[in-house]
Amino acid sequence: MPVHLVTVGMDNDFLNIADKGTDEYYTAGIYLQYGFASNSPKNILRKILPLPSSKSSSFFSIGLTQWMFTPSDLKTTNYAKDDYPYCGSLFLGLSREILLNKKFISFGNLAGNHGKIRLRRTNTNACS
């Protein structure tokens, strides 16, 4: 029976169980991921994401992720050296996992942008 998995998630460092949210540095993330199990030798992802065993059943996933960052002083509009600017990252990820001889092996690739194409508003202190 085929196995398929869709994951939608969100991180936010301001919302936490300790009620000590800061909303600084890594502030939030949104992700959407689709995964499936396959042992077909014709799967193109086996060539893109090579692992030692071509005969083992693999779990493949592809996902889109956005990360958002803020400086430690949320009221600033000026660039501060050694601090995060208001910034966002948008990237696509591919991964493959197998279980081989009682060992879990994972391999993946990420490609993305840390700049203008990142699905967020522009700010005077935004990354370029």
Image (cartoon, rainbow, N blue to C red):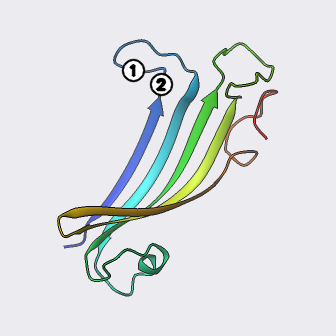
| Residue 105 location, quadrant | bottom left
Left-right relation of 17 to 27: left
Using the numbered discs, state the Cα–Cα distance from disc 1 to disc 2 in whole angstroms.
6 Å
**Residue hosting label 2:** 13
Q: Do the residues bearing badges 1 and 2 touch, measured as CB atoms within 8 Å?
A: yes
Q: Residue 16 carries which label?
A: 1
Give x and y (percent) for residue 89. 63, 44
- State whether residue 97 is above or below residue 69: below
Q: Which amino acid does label 2 sit on?
A: Asp
Give x and y (percent) for residue 52. 34, 76
Determine whether the residue tagged by mark 1 lies in a helix, strand or loop.
Answer: loop
Depth check, front residue: 59 or 7:
59
Give x and y (percent) for residue 25. 59, 26
User: Which residue is rendered at x = 28% and y = 79% of the image?
Assistant: 39
Q: Which mark is residue 116?
A: none
Q: Quadrant of the N terminus?
A: bottom left
Depth check, front residue: 53 or 60:
53
User: Which residue is rendered at x = 64% and y = 26% of the image?
Assistant: 70
| Residue 112 location, quadrant | bottom right
